[in-house]
Image (cartoon, rainbow, N blue to C red):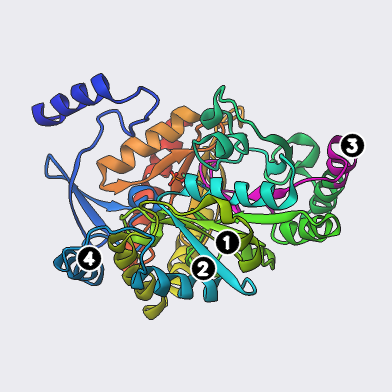
Amino acid sequence: MSDRTEDLLARHRAVIPNWVALYYDHPIEIVRGKGNRVTDAEGNTYLDFFTGILTNMIGYDVAEVRQAVERQLATGVVHTSTAYLLRGQVALAEKIAKLSGIKDAKVFFTNSGTEANETALLLATYARKTDQVLAMRQSYHGRSFGAIGVTSNRNWKNNSYSPLNVHFLHGADRHLPQFARLSDSDYIKVCVEDLRHVLATATGGDVACLIAEPIQGVGGFTMAPDGLFLAYKDVLDEHGILFVSDEVQTGWGRTGQSFWGIGNHGVVPDAMTFAKGLGNGFAVGGVVARGDLLDSLHAVGLSTFGGNPISMAAANATLDYVLDHDLQANAARTGSSIIEGLSKAAEGLSVVGEVRGKGLMFAIEMVDPVTGEPSPALAGRMMEETRTRGLLGGKGGLYGNVLRMAPPLTLTDAEAEEGLGILVDVLEEIDREMR
Ligand code: PLP
C-alpha cells in the first residue's frame, strides 16, 4: 500500500466508526471510473463486479447522466424547495408508476433505501393501525429504527432496538437440515403453513405488512424459490395484509428475467421500495405504491432533499438509458453466461458450496472442502486474489462466506468472459491448494 493510501486509512480509522467495514486487507481508494472499470490511487485498474454497492448501475462517467446533471447545474438550481413544482420529479414518478405495474400508483422520493423502507413501514402501520409486521429471516432493510427492526441478519442487526413488533418467516433459510431435501413446491407449502401458523398463534391476524427482498442482498444473494411470494400473497390478501417488496438491490432489470425482482414470483405488490442504482451514483430512493395508500399518509409532508433536481436529472437519465438500451435483456444474457460458466466450473470443485443468482446478481458460496461448512476465510481469499487479478467483488452472507457480484447492467460479453475467467482461475487455484 502506498504512503498516500496508508495515511488515508489511518485518518479513516480515527474518525469513521469501526463498524463501517472496509473491503480488502489493503483497502482501496477509487479515484477514477470509466465504463465498467475503476482505477485506484495507486494506478491499478479493475473490472468492477460490485459497482459501488450496486449503485453505478450503468457504469462510470456515462455521458448521458453527466450531461443531464450538468444541464441542471447550469440553471443554478441545485436544490429548491420540494414544495415547488419540480418537472424532473414528476417525469420520473410517471415513468416509475407505469413500470411498477401497480394500479393507480404514486411515488414518493427519498434519499436512500433505508428512508424508502421507513416510509413503506410508516405507510403500512398507519394504514392498518398496528405495529405488527412480518419480515424474512436473514433479511436486511437498512439502519434506521424501523428498517433495522425488520432486519434479521445478525451481522447487520447486531444488538439494535426497534419499536416494531416483528415476526420473521422462513423462505430464505433453505439450507436448514429440515428443509434441505424438500422440493421447491414442498418447501413453499411448509413456508405457507408457517405463515398461517404465525398469523394464527402470534398475531391474531392484525398485521400491517410483509416486507421482503425478492433476492436477499447482504444475506448473500439468497433466493427463495420462485412462486413463494405468490403463495404468501394469497394468505396475506385473506387478512388484508399489505405486501412490500424491497427492490433496493433487485430492481431495474438486474435479475434479467423480470424488471422487478418480485416479478420472478409472479406478484404485483402493494408497494415497492427502491434506491441504489437508480441515480447511477447520485442518491435517490423512493416508494412506489397504490395511490390511495400513499395519499392516506397525508400527515408526513415532504422530504427536504427527496426528489431534488440534481438527483432527479441523474435518475431520469439513468432510467432512460436502461430502457433505451434494453439493459434487462443484457443482464439476462451476460448474467446467465456467467452463472452457467461458474456452475459448470464448480461441479468439480470441493471449495464451492453453491453458485446461485439471477441475471447480473450472482454469488459463489465458499465452503471448507472437508467439512462442507461455510468458510469465510476462503471467501476472503477469493476477494483478495480476484482483486490482485483486476476484479472487484463484494463479500457477504450470514456466515461471511459468500462472494457477491452485481456488475453494471452495461456489462459487455467480452467483460463477462473476462470476469468469469478470473473467477474460475482463482477458484481452481484455491481448490488445487486445498487438496
Ligand atoms: N434494502 C436493501 C435490500 C439493501 O440492500 C439496502 C442497502 O444495502 C437497504 C435497503 C438500505 O439502503 P441504503 O443503504 O441506501 O439506506
Tell me what residue is drawn at x 30 percent, y 63 percent. 309
Q: From the image, tell me which residue sits under label 4.
A: 69
Which of pointers 2 and 1 lies earlier in the amino acid sequence?
2
Tell me what residue is drawn at x 64 percent, y 59 percent. 296
Of the residues shown, which amino acid type is indicated by label 1?
Answer: Gly
Q: Which mark is residue 261?
A: 1
How far apart marks 4 and 1 lie (CA) works out to: 28 Å
Q: Which mark is residue 256?
A: 2
How far apart marks 3 and 2 lie (CA) works out to: 39 Å
Q: Bin the neighbour count of mark 2 within 10 Å (Cα to Cα): few under 14, some 14-19, many 20 and up.
A: many
Task: Tell me if label 2 and label 4 are in contact, CB under 8 Å.
Answer: no
Q: Magenta residues? A: 196-224
Task: Tell me if label 4 and label 3 are in contact, CB under 8 Å.
Answer: no
Q: Whole-percent x and y of residue 410?
A: 34, 67
Q: From the image, tell me which residue sits under label 3.
A: 201
Q: Whole-percent x and y of residue 308?
A: 33, 59
